[in-house]
Amino acid sequence: MIRISTSETNCSHDPQTSCGTCRLNTLCLPLSLHLDDVDQLNRIVQRGRPLHKGEHLYRAEDPFDALFAIRSGAVKASTLNEQGEEQVTGFYLPGELVGLDGIADNRYTNTVVALETSSICEIPFEQVEDLSLKIPSLQRNVFQLLSREITQDQQLISLLSKSSAEERVATLLLSLSSRHQRRKLSPTAFRLPMSRTDIGNFLGLTIETISRVFSRLQQQKVLSVDKKEIHILDMEQLRQLASQRH
Amino acid sequence: MIRISTSETNCSHDPQTSCGTCRLNTLCLPLSLHLDDVDQLNRIVQRGRPLHKGEHLYRAEDPFDALFAIRSGAVKASTLNEQGEEQVTGFYLPGELVGLDGIADNRYTNTVVALETSSICEIPFEQVEDLSLKIPSLQRNVFQLLSREITQDQQLISLLSKSSAEERVATLLLSLSSRHQRRKLSPTAFRLPMSRTDIGNFLGLTIETISRVFSRLQQQKVLSVDKKEIHILDMEQLRQLASQRH
DNA sequence: CGTGATTTTGAGCAGGATCAAAAAGTGTGG
DNA sequence: CCACACTTTTTGATCCTGCTCAAAATCACG
C-alpha cells in the first residue's frame, strides 16, 4: 500500500494502490522482480499521510529505519556543516529515493523537508535487508542505488569545483528537465519547486547571483522565467552554457 | 591472500599473510565476522603485484568486477567531467576502500592511480555479493560502507560550496591527520603523497592558491611545510581555521 | 489592501584566478 | 658527480567573477 497521492501523478488515488500497479515502481525501487516478489515488496511499503510544504520527513540525527520513495511533490535534502550552516545536498522528485545517508551510522545525516505537498512511500529498511538476503536481484538493486547516489554526488562535486555560475544553473535546469522527461512530462516547461535561496545554497552561489543568471538567460532568450515557472526556449543553447569551455 | 606489502605497514611480508592476521582487517572491510567467515573472506581476496607510482588500478569505463582495499601507499581517484577535465574525488590511504563507484552501472566512473608504490587487495565483487546473501552482517557492512561514502562526498560538497581557500586546505590537513592517527601514526607529522596540483584539483582551487595558503600557514607558525613533509605545529589554530565563521 | 517575505537590480569590493617569471627540485646521461 | 633539461612550486602583479551591502520591486496571503 502507498500513501495517498495528492497531486500531479496519474496514479489511482485508491489507498489500495499497490506497488505492482504503481506506474512509478520501475523508478522508485528499480526492482526487476518476479510477481511473487512484487507482492512481498508491496507488503512492506507503508502507507501514510501526505506531507505538506515545510513539513519534515526526517531530521539529521533522527534514528534511521526507513528509505522513502517520493510519489508526488518534491523534497529538499540538506545537511548542517560544522558552522551550523545549511548545505542543500539534493532535490528529489517523484520516483526518486531519499534516506540512503542514514544507513552508515543508523541515523540520518540529512534533513528532508517537503517543498510542496508530497506523497511519500515509506520502506522500512530492516525489511529491505531481510528481503535482500532472499532475493539476490534486490540486493544488487540496493547496492546499485547506493552506488548511483555516490556517482551523482561526485558529479555535483565536479560542478561545484570547476564551473561558473552560469554553468551551474544551466546544469541544474537540464537535470530537472531530463528528470521531468523521464516522467513523461514536458522537458521544456516546468515549475521549480524550490526557492532561489535553495537553488543558491545547492549550487554554492548567492541568491543574487542566481537571480542575475536567470535574468541574463532570459535576455538571451534561452529561458523564459516567470516566478517559478520555467520555459526552456533554446535547449541547444542551454546545453552549450552547461558545458562551456572557459 | 594479500598483495605483498612493499612499504610502511607492520604486516608480515609473507605472501601467505591472511585477512585474519592482517592488522588492517578491521579497517579495510570492517567485518565483524566469526572465524569461519574470516576464512571465507580470506579465500576470495586476491593477491597481486604492488602498484608503482603513476600506475593505474583501474580507469573510468573499465568493466567493474572488484573492490580494492589499500594495504600500503596511497592512491588518487578522479572522474572526467563533460569538458574532459579531471576532478579528483578522493585520496585513499591504507585501510580504505575504492571501487564503490563501479557498482551502479557495472563500470567504474572513476580512474584510480597510485600516488606512490602501493600494495592493494583485490576483492571480487561478485563474491562479496554471494557471501553477503549468506552473511547478514556482511551485507549490512557493505550497505554501510556505501552509505558512508555518500555522507563523505556530501561533506566535500559542503566544503566546496561554502568554504574559503584557507578552510579547505585546513580541513584536508585535518582529515589526513586523523586518518594517520587512526593508523597509530603521528597525527602531526606526515608526508603528503599527492602533488599541489592534485590538492588544488580536489579542493577546487588553483595550484597557486594552494601554495600561497601553505606559505601563509607557515608564516603564522601553524604548519611547517618542507616540500611534501607536513608538521602541524598548532593543531588548535588549524582547527579554528578549518571552521572559521566569515 | 497592507505587511512581511522573496526576488530583482545596482554599486562597489575582494578572494581567488590568470598570466608571468623566478626558484627549487628531479632525473638523465655523459 | 655534475651539467642540462624538465617539472613542480613559489612569488608577484593584475584582472574578473561572484560576494556584500543597499534599496527597490514584486509576491503571498491574511
Image (cartoon, coloured by chain):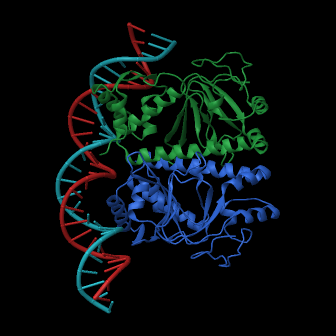
Chain colours: A green, B blue, C red, D cyan
**What residue lies at 66% left-to-right and 70% top-to-bottom?**
B2
**What residue lies at 32% left-to-right and 31% top-to-bottom?**
A212
* D19 left or right, relative to A96: left
Q: Position of residue B13 (x, y in %)?
A: 65, 79
Q: Is residue B167 visible?
A: no
**What residue lies at 55% left-to-right and 23% top-to-bottom?**
A116
Q: Examine the rendered structure and indicate whether residue C17 appears above or below residue A17.
A: below
* A151 left or right, relative to B201: right
Q: Quadrant of residue B221?
A: bottom left
- The tally of labels here is 0
**What residue lies at 53% left-to-right and 46% top-to-bottom?**
A151
Q: Position of residue A119 (x, y in %)?
A: 63, 24
Q: Position of residue B185 (x, y in %)?
A: 58, 72
A154 or B55, which lies in front? B55
Q: Is residue B153 visible?
A: yes
Q: Examine the rendered structure and indicate whether residue B130 appears above or below residue D11.
A: above
